Image (cartoon, helix red, strand yellow):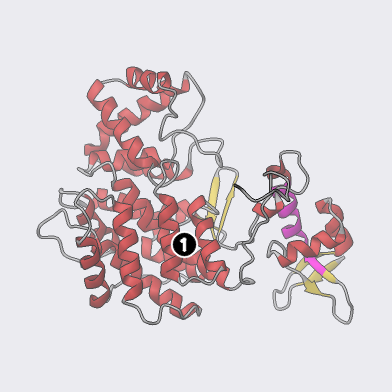
Amino acid sequence: MRDQEPGSGHPERRLTTKEAAELLGVKPETVYAYVSRGQLGSRRVPGGRGSTFDAQEVETLARRNRRESNGTPGTGAEQSVRTRLTLIDQDRYYYRGVDATELAARHSYEEVAEWLWTGRMRTGATFTAPPASVEAARRAVGALPEHTGPTDRLRVAAIAAAVADPLRFDLSQDAVLGAARTLIPTLVAALPAKLPAHRDGGSLAQRLWGRLSWQPAAEAPLHVLDTALALLVDHDLAASTLAVRVAASARAHAYAAVTAGLGVIEGPLHGAASGLAHRLVLEVLDQGSAGPVIAEELRAGRRIPGLGHRLYTQEDPRARALFALLEEIPEAAPALAAARDIVATAARHTPLHANVDLALAVLTASCGMEASAGETVFAVARTAGWIAHALEEYGERPLRMRPSGLYVGPKPPRPLPE
């Protein structure tokens, strides 16, 4: 059957419940279970009792179920969450339907964040932190031990900023967006400054640079940093993003949802991966060749950082965009050559391509930044994406992120322990 989206001006193919069930390979009642979980949208038939479903949405869910099920019916559906934010398809990714690499090439991090949040482009958008929020965050972060890592500092700063905002429990879109526009610059302002004369004015990338490098910000490297922030805003349902959506599903406020994401991103397989790649690049520069360094990694049975991504068959498009910009910076040439040596040497063992962690490592290693700088860039950038996902989740049924456990323990009843 065919239907038309009200006000769209063009036809949209709709499926009956029976047709959707056949396409998904499930019973009709399971189709409605997908609707209740927020995995499918439905529309009542005018004057009738049945519902119709968007054919493209059903086909997307069917493909995802087949991809994730690994041959076991029903195991993939619970891992799918409807979103209008980011699509990853055929080694490219899109923010609200727009190529993300092209968007990042033409717009600042703040503008890209606004696009992801609202679907509207706010040219010249800037984020400003209120003094009370910055003061609370700096005081809390300043009390931490000197060896504290960047993600710990950001997490504490987010909690302090939340306490300073008495309206944080307002989950309306305007309130959440207002909190986001102040939280992100607050997180940056709470980090210790590297440059003594650093000020908190300018773009977010300019402010963040002074927290990452002891070198003054030249125009070209600063542009790379701003582009990196925009490229990293979101990447579908990464582990940290899923944690944010679970928190938002329980109606945690935006600050708490971001804190949940920061707790997950600290892992070595997520946000901290760029730090491992940074150290690898420095070791290759020190050795003069990637051969012995890669050999030692393989001998120790370690995964080579900065290579491979489960969502891309070729080079990570984020890495490709950053490498192209880094080629224009003479100071980045040695680290860039080391990265290419790593890719070429590792290719003899396994055909893996560079990912964004390796590109971040070239940026941080060539601009006087510490190994943890990439983790900071990743966390600050992704905060905007977490806010976007929290906003989406606030519009869904509360507590829908509640999978059932598959109990594999001793069969009850058992006697009380002695």
User: Where 81 falls versus 313 (above or below)?
Assistant: below
Which secondary structure type mostly characterizes the magenta part of the structure?
helix
Taking the image as shown, residue 85 lies to the left or right of residue 60, namely left
Q: Residue at x 40, y 54 (%)?
A: 105
Q: Residue at x 23, y 51 (%)?
A: 212
- Residue 29: image quadrant is bottom right
How far from the left and from the top, in percent, is residue 115? 47, 67
Is residue 402 found inside the magenta-colored segment of the image? Answer: no
Residue 323 visible at all: no
Q: Nearer the viewer, residue 410 or 25?
A: 410
Is residue 56 found inside the magenta-colored segment of the image? Answer: yes
How far from the left and from the top, in percent, is residue 293? 33, 21
User: Where 170 falls versus 241 (above or below)?
Assistant: below
Amino acid type, label 1: Trp
Q: Nearer the viewer, residue 354 or 107?
A: 354
Q: Which residues are magenta?
A: 52-65
How far from the left and from the top, in percent, is residue 390? 51, 67
| Residue designated by label 1 | 386
How far from the left and from the top, in percent, is residue 361? 32, 39
Taking the image as shown, residue 83 lies to the left or right of residue 219, namely right
Per the image, label 1 sits on a secondary structure element best described as helix
Q: Nearer the viewer, residue 84 or 297?
A: 297
Q: Residue at x 45, y 60 (%)?
A: 260
What is the quadrant of the N terminus in the image? bottom right
- Residue 321: image quadrant is top left
Taking the image as shown, residue 369 lies to the left or right of residue 259, namely left
Residue 352 visible at all: yes
Q: Tag count in the figure?
A: 1
- Residue 342: image quadrant is top left
